[in-house]
Every structure is written in structure tokens, then in C-alpha cells.
Image (tube, rainbow, N blue to C red):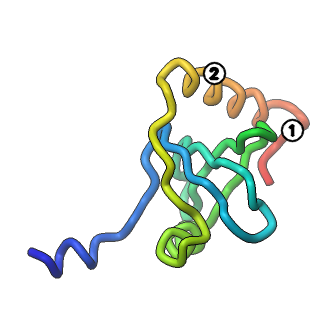
Amino acid sequence: MIKHWFSKKKHPHRGHAYAVTTGNFVGEMLVYVKQLGAEYSFISIPKNINRNVPVEKFELGLNEGIVDHVDQIDHKVCKLLFKQYEHNLKGTNNTK
């Protein structure tokens, strides 16, 4: 049972926030929206831009402490963030 716990892959949960602690996006909070193929899609706070992160890079970031799980975002705030995410897909503030 312990082996199963350690081998379990880490993946984001919809509406949960992840803090970026190092790298190009340091200081951003990534709120998970959905998976798009081999990438996880997030909306970044405070920039309100969409970010796609390859699954392998995100899992490596969690394992290496580059990305830390913070908490689940309030349901009402999530609704607004998800609307912003969809708006970004339609407009000029597209995915990076």
C-alpha cells in the first residue's frame, strides 16, 4: 500500500491554486482549469492570462518544489476565473 502511495502521479485538481516559486513565472498563482491533451491548462493570477504547461513539466515542478499546491480557490472566485479563461481564448489575451 505504501508503494502505491509513492508511485501515484501528482496531478492538479480543478479550481486549486499552485504557487510558482522559481523560474520565469515566479510569483504567479496558477489556478487549474482543465487538461488539453498532454498539457494542463491554468489561468494565472494576478496576470489573468492562460498558461499551458506540459504534464511532465508540471509533475516535475511539484516533485522538485518549483510549484507548490496552495489551496482550493473559493467557488465564486473560480467561476469568475473560469469565465476569464474562456474570454482569453476568444480574445487577444490568449494562451502562453
Taking depth in this image into account, of 89 and 57 the one nearest to the observer is 57
User: What residue does disc 1 label?
Assistant: 93
- Residue 83, x across and y down, in percent: 66, 24
Taking depth in this image into account, of 48 and 50 the one nearest to the observer is 48
Label 1's element? loop
Do labels 1 and 2 touch, CB within 8 Å? no
Q: State the quadrant of the N terminus.
A: bottom left
- Residue 52, x across and y down, in percent: 68, 56
User: What residue does disc 2 label?
Assistant: 80
Mark 2 neighbour class, 10 Å CA radius: few under 14, some 14 to 19, many 20 or more: few
Q: Residue at x 42, y 60 (%)?
A: 11
Earlier sequence position, callout 1 versus callout 2? 2
Callout 1 amino acid: Asn
**Real-space Cα distance between discs 1 and 2?**
16 Å
Label 2's element? helix
Q: Residue at x 46, y 43 (%)?
A: 71
Horizontal side of residue 17 vs 84, given as left or right:
left
